[in-house]
Image (cartoon, helix red, strand yellow):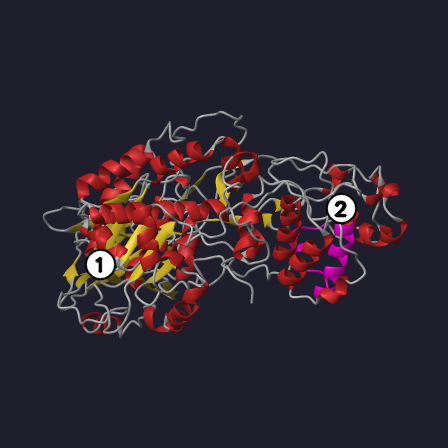
């Protein structure tokens, strides 16, 4: 994503232009001329509705009947009020309580509903919903309410207004700006909305009980699909969850295939923009406006890659803003919401089935099978794609093949199996520095080494489909780098991923595969002439100094006091603290209360004998220096440096730790010789430590 910063910044400069903003008198004029966010003039007439008894030329009058009340939706007439919205699940709204005094239609609610403990996710303030029959496509939506925005929430077809009123960015690194937001000024509301169904709902909901809210006027102006400007590149948009997301350095080593796949394309021919974010599903990506932003930003002929399924498995499917879906809801989102909306904008959908999760505690010899056993989302996506003629990449099936090809040890290693000292990064529930704070091997999220393989699988499948006559796949393949196309055809990927070593992709040798591949990629460590890394080979002091000097851009003379020979843990600790002081003038953010608060070594109230559990999942070692049982074995001239390195968290016990466990050992083992794989672990930790926390982790070479 670093490569698309210029594109993102250009988009950010257009936010003010592309976000609709109408005044009461300017709304109709704007909607009959150039539609906001469009490069074309719409030839379609706007849909205009007047809810007052004052006649307005060009408007459809919505008449209140004193005997029968508000008009109910009639598909023949093409408009009317409904009993429930189009959301999934449908939200109950009221029609019998709607009244009119000639200045608009009103409703007052005496009570609301909110689910205890889930008040923000599942609530209903009822109100009214006016349905308008319109074809799939984009619309500028202008609504004048009878009530002020402080008393009213206006939604369009189940969208989450509270999210749409905010600006910001769609991605963690803040490279992809939110361009299309809702606006509420007094009694005037504006949306830009891409509709997939053959109708659109205007929902008016009160914010306060016993406070009347209502509707006076609605204008929908169709916005035609946008032609690509001469000389501009087509775009591949990526939309998915945490397994597709682009990650920042503070989340290292977690990665998504969307973070890697841009490197497979010739970026002089195509843009690749990743809209994916953790926790998203078909439902949440729709309600928060993420999908809508893509469709309004895209041009005719652009591509939308979609992968959802993991968060759709959540069992909150009946909550208003839950993430989950039943199988029926999942299929409806595909067929009635996403596909028609994408195609109405002249864009081209590509489906990617979600990769299978893995069993985190799988024993050697375990055979992986599809994790989607209760809700068969990949099967639904495949069936829907076949019925609709959509190009589909079956990453679900291919992921299972790959897991079983490399085996349990290697598969577990490239998923989020974290042990103490592996990374200074963090997740939402704490630092990874002492092991995964969730106390488990995370079988859903994975490291960069696996993200590369998923990207490889996706482009390989595209090449295969293109060769077999899939015109969409063939067009996408035309944007790939020539060497990637060749690798996909031949199955030889050594030129694309030269960092892969023959002896670290399967079996026990793959334990630190992620660190090893990154250090080889950066040119810090290397393979032998046979393509092996030799992870169990002993490291020398000279080699380690050469590696850390290159990695951290330090002069080798800093480490002149260390004679060459076998690298012991005590010497490595001393070298690490020397490198730390040479590189940093203050503590990196990973070491600060950025990861939470705790009493750490050096603080006035620090107690080295405090029960580690009482300090929570923090960056600093859970076992204090004083609690280590073998520090007396450290050479006297190295003690102070090794102690400082340990208390800074630069080196930790390797005995008694385990992946998926928040645990520290009590033995430092100062005289133990460091292997190449253990050196890679320490070097990787230092590499992450020197990175800015909120910068996208898209580094493949040293500056």
Residue 267 x, y percent position in the rendering: 35, 65
Residue 201 vs residue 44, the one in the foreground: 44
How far apart marks 2 and 1 lie (CA) works out to 60 Å
**Residue shown at 24% from the left, 69% from the top:** 38
* Residue 307 image-quadrant placement: top left
Residue 59 x, y percent position in the rendering: 15, 64
Say which of marks 2 and 1 sits in front: 2
Give the quarter of the figure containing the C terminus. bottom right
Residue 583 x, y percent position in the rendering: 70, 65
Q: Residues within 10 Å of mark 1 (few under 14, many from 20)?
A: many
Q: Residues within 10 Å of mark 2 (few under 14, many from 20)?
A: many
Looking at the rendered structure, which numbered label has been put on residue 562? none
Judge whether residue 628 can be spotted in this image.
yes
Q: Earlier in the sequence, mark 2 or mark 1?
A: 1
Q: Which residues are magenta?
A: 571-597
Label 1: state its secondary structure: loop
Label 2: state its secondary structure: helix
Looking at the rendered structure, which numbered label has been put on residue 569? 2
Residue 172 vs residue 360, the one in the foreground: 360
**Residue shown at 24% from the left, 51% from the top:** 473
Q: Which residue is mark 1?
A: 345
Check if residue 107 falls in the magenta segment: no
Instruction: Examine the rendered structure and indicate whether residue 571 appears above or below residue 665.
Output: below
Judge whether residue 105 can be spotted in this image.
no
Instruction: Examine the rendered structure and indicate whether residue 128 appears above or below residue 271.
Output: above
Instruction: Examine the rendered structure and indicate whether residue 664 appears above or below residue 598.
Output: above
In the picture as drawn, the residue positioned furthest to the front comes out as 529
- Please, what is the dominant secondary structure of the magenta stretch? helix
Residue 593 x, y percent position in the rendering: 69, 54
Give the quarter of the figure containing the N terminus. bottom left
């Amino acid at each position: 994503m670093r490569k698309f910063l210029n594109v993102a910044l250009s988009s950010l400069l257009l936010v003010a232009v592309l976000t609709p903003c109408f005044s009461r008198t300017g709304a109709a004029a704007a909607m009959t001329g150039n539609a906001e966010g469009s490069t074309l003039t719409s030839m379609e007439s706007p849909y205009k509705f007047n809810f007052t008894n004052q006649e307005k030329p060009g408007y459809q009058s919505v008449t209140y009947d004193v005997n029968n009340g508000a008009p109910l939706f009639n598909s023949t007439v093409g408009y009317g009020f409904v009993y429930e919205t189009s959301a999934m699940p449908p939200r109950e709204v009221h029609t019998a309580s709607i009244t009119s005094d000639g200045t608009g239609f009103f409703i007052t609610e005496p009570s609301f509903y909110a689910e205890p403990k889930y008040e923000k996710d599942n609530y209903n303030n009822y109100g009214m919903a006016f349905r308008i029959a319109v074809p799939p496509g984009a619309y500028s939506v202008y609504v004048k309410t009878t009530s002020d925005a402080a008393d009213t929430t206006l939604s369009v077809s189940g969208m989450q207004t509270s999210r749409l009123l905010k600006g910001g960015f769609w991605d963690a690194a803040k490279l992809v700006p939110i361009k299309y937001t809702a606006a509420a000024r007094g009694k005037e509301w504006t949306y830009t909305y891409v509709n997939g169904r053959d109708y659109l709902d205007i929902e008016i909901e009160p914010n306060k009980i016993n406070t009347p809210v209502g509707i006076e006027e609605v204008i929908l102006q169709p916005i035609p699909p946008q032609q690509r400007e001469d000389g501009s590149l087509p775009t591949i948009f990526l939309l998915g969850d945490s397994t597709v997301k682009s990650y920042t350095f503070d989340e290292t080593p977690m990665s998504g295939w969307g973070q890697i796949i841009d490197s497979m394309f010739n970026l002089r021919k195509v843009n690749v923009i990743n809209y994916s974010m953790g926790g998203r599903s078909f439902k949440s990506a729709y309600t928060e406006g993420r999908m809508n932003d893509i469709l309004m930003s895209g041009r005719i002929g652009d591509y939308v890659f979609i992968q959802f399924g993991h968060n759709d498995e959540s069992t909150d499917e009946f909550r208003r803003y839950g993430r989950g879906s039943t199988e029926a809801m999942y299929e409806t989102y595909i067929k009635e919401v996403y596909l028609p909306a994408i195609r109405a904008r002249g864009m081209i959908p590509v489906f990617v089935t979600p990769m299978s999760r893995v069993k985190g505690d799988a024993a050697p010899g375990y055979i992986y099978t599809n994790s989607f056993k209760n809700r068969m989302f990949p099967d639904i996506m495949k069936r829907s794609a076949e019925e609709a003629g959509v190009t589909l990449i079956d990453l679900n099936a291919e992921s299972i093949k790959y897991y079983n090809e490399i085996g349990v040890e290697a598969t577990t290693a490239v998923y989020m199996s974290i042990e103490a000292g592996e990374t200074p990064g963090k997740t939402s529930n704490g630092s990874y520095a002492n092991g995964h704070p969730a106390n488990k091997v995370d079988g859903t999220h994975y490291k960069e080494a696996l993200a590369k393989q998923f990207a490889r699988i996706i482009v390989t499948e595209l090449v295969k489909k293109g060769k077999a006559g899939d015109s969409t796949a063939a067009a996408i393949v035309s944007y790939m780098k020539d060497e990637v196309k060749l690798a996909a055809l031949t199955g030889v990927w050594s030129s694309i991923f030269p960092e892969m070593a023959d002896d670290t992709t399967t079996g026990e040798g793959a334990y630190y595969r992620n660190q090893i591949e990154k250090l080889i990629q950066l040119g810090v460590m290397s393979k032998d002439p046979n393509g092996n890394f030799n992870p169990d080979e002993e490291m020398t002091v000279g080699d380690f100094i050469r590696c850390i000097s290159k990695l951290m851009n330090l002069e080798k003379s800093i480490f002149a006091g260390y004679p060459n020979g076998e690298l012991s843990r005590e010497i490595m600790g001393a070298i690490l603290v020397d490198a730390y002081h040479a590189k940093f003038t203050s503590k990196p953010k990973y070491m600060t209360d950025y990861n939470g608060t705790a009493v750490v070594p050096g603080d006035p109230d620090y107690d080295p004998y405090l029960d580690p559990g009482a300090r929570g999942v923090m960056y600093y070692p859970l076992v204090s220096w004083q609690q280590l049982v073998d520090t007396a074995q450290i050479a006297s001239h190295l003690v102070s440096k090794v102690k400082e390195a340990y208390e800074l968290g630069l080196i930790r016990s390797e005995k008694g730790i385990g992946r998926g466990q928040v645990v520290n050992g009590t033995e430092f083992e100062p005289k133990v010789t460091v292997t190449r794989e253990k050196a890679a672990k320490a070097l990787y930790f230092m590499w992450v430590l020197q990175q800015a926390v909120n910068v996208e982790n898209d580094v493949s070479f040293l500056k």
